[in-house]
Image (cartoon, helix red, strand yellow):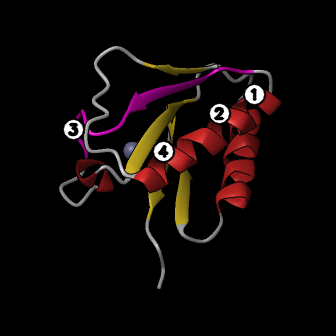
């Protein structure tokens, strides 16, 4: 199941991030977990963050049993999304951004 944390602003979300969210949901499901979006265009991020243009999403990680599971999920997600996306495991979420390299 895919869920949005209360207060998450989705207006202006890029279709590329929508696709990443679909992929993330299937990766989370393969680990037996719901995928919870904790930030899209809302919240405070670094001044150059891709969140403000709808090209980034944060996903909840506290549901995982251990850091190693979170690392594994982030790695699988990166493998599925390929080179045009960056997947970064932060202290309390997985940050995914669409940033084509060409
Ligand atoms: Zn983020």
- How far apart are the alpha carbons under marks 4 and 1? 17 Å
Q: In the picture, residue 30 is in which quadrant? A: top right
Q: Give the mark, 4 or 2, whose residue is nearer the N terminus.
A: 4
Does residue 79 show up?
yes
- The residue labelled by disc 3 is 44
* Res 55 label: none
- How far apart are the alpha carbons under marks 3 and 2? 24 Å
Does residue 89 show up?
no
Classed neighbour count for the residue bearing mark 1: other residues with Cα under 10 Å, few (<14), some (14–19), many (≥20): some
Asked if the residues shown at circle 2 and circle 1 are in contact, with their CB atoms under 8 angstroms apart, the answer is: yes
SS for tag 3? loop
Q: Give the mark, 3 or 1, whose residue is nearer the N terminus.
A: 1
- The residue labelled by disc 4 is 18
Rendered position, 19 above or below 102:
above
- How far apart are the alpha carbons under marks 4 and 2? 11 Å
Asked if the residues shown at circle 3 and circle 1 are in contact, with their CB atoms under 8 angstroms apart, the answer is: no
Residue at 75% in and 50% down: 76
- How far apart are the alpha carbons under marks 3 and 1? 28 Å
Residue at 51% in and 34% down: 59
Classed neighbour count for the residue bearing mark 2: other residues with Cα under 10 Å, few (<14), some (14–19), many (≥20): many
SS for tag 4? helix
**Which stretch appears magenta?**
33-45
Residue at 73% in and 59% down: 79
In the image, ligand 1 is in what quadrant?
top left
* Res 29 label: 1
For residue 33, side relative to residue 99 (left or right): right
* Furthest residue in direction front, as rendered: 15
Q: Give the mark, 4 or 3, whose residue is nearer the N terminus.
A: 4
> Any magenta on residue 42?
yes
Residue 32, position as x, y percentages in the image = 79, 21
- The residue labelled by disc 2 is 25
């Amino acid at each position: 199941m895919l869920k949005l944390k209360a207060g998450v602003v989705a207006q202006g979300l890029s279709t590329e991030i929508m696709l990443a969210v679909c992929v993330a949901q299937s990766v989370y499901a393969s680990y037996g977990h719901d995928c919870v979006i904790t930030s899209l265009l809302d919240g405070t991020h670094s001044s150059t963050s891709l969140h403000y243009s709808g090209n980034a999403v944060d996903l909840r990680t506290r549901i995982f049993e251990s850091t190693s599971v979170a690392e594994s999920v982030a790695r699988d997600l990166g493998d599925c999304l390929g080179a045009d996306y960056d997947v970064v495991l932060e202290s309390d979420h997985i940050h995914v951004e669409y940033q084509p390299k060409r």
